[in-house]
Image (cartoon, grey):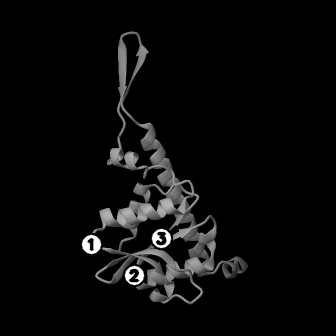
């Protein structure tokens, strides 16, 4: 076991854990959205003169999201994801300032760390940083260094992977979950 312990240092373990957690979150939310889309109130006839009603939950705020298309899969379109982030910041976090292209060096990360695409600030203080990444970029050291620097600074951070659905509800939940208390 000594060889394996040396091979997988704490940083490697944290990077793997972060990547797995992110992937699991994306899969769980995709499954939840699929389940929510399939549940509705229906009447089924199982035998003569017997009706069975199946009642499922209906998601909150469905009509508005469907009208604007924000609940659809982003189809890898970065502009769609950016529009959703900007819309969420304006509607759900109106007292916050949304900034773009924030260098990770602001949080003490090295110069080769990846910058954040968006950041939510309250009274000039950073609260949540967001990266938009292509598939497998979340594995890069430059990304992990930036996330670790935010964590040490007490600032929430997460990334969105472009091959995932990135629905409005998912992005809003990730911002809320990453927001420090």
What whole-number distance in Å separates the C-alpha atoms at marks 2 and 1? 20 Å
Residue 121 is drawn in which quadrant? bottom left
Q: Point out the frontmost of discs 2 and 3.
A: 3
Q: Residues within 10 Å of mark 2 (few under 14, many from 20)?
A: some
Seen at 43% across and 57% down, the residue is: 170
Residue 153, position as x, y percentages in the image = 42, 85
Label 2 sits on residue? 154
Residue 40 is drawn in which quadrant? top left
Q: Is residue 62 above or below residue 17?
A: above
Label 1 sits on residue? 95
Q: Residues within 10 Å of mark 3 (few under 14, many from 20)?
A: many
The circle on residue 158 is: 3
Residue 71, position as x, y percentages in the image = 43, 50
Point out the image quarter for the N terminus: bottom right
Residue 181 visible to the viewer: no
Tell me which label, 2 or 1, sits earlier in the chain.
1
Seen at 57% across and 90% down, the residue is: 111
Q: Point out the frontmost of discs 2 and 1.
A: 1
Residue 151, position as x, y percentages in the image = 45, 80
Seen at 56% across and 80% down, the residue is: 114
Point out the image quarter for the C terminus: bottom left
Q: Nearer the viewer, residue 141 or 114?
A: 114
Q: Is residue 161 above or below residue 44?
A: below
Residue 144, position as x, y percentages in the image = 56, 78
Q: Secondary structure at mark 2?
A: loop
* Cβ atoms at labels 2 and 1 below 8 Å apart: no
């Amino acid at each position: 076991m000594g060889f394996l312990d040396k091979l997988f240092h704490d940083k490697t373990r944290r990077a793997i854990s972060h990547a797995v957690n992110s992937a699991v979150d994306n899969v769980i939310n995709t499954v939840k959205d699929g389940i929510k889309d399939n549940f509705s109130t229906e009447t089924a006839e199982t035998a003569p003169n017997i009706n069975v009603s199946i009642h499922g939950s209906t998601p909150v705020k469905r009509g508005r999201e469907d009208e604007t298309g924000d609940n659809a899969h982003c189809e890898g379109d970065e502009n769609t994801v950016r529009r959703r982030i900007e819309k969420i910041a304006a509607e759900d976090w109106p007292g916050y300032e949304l900034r773009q292209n924030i260098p990770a060096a602001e949080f003490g990360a090295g110069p080769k760390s990846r910058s954040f695409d968006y950041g939510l600030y309250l009274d000039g203080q950073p609260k949540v940083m967001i990266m938009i990444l292509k598939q497998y970029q979340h594995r890069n050291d430059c990304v992990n260094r930036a996330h670790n620097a935010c964590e040490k600074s007490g600032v929430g951070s997460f990334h969105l992977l472009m091959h995932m659905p990135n629905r409005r509800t998912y992005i809003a939940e990730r911002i809320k979950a990453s927001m420090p208390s």
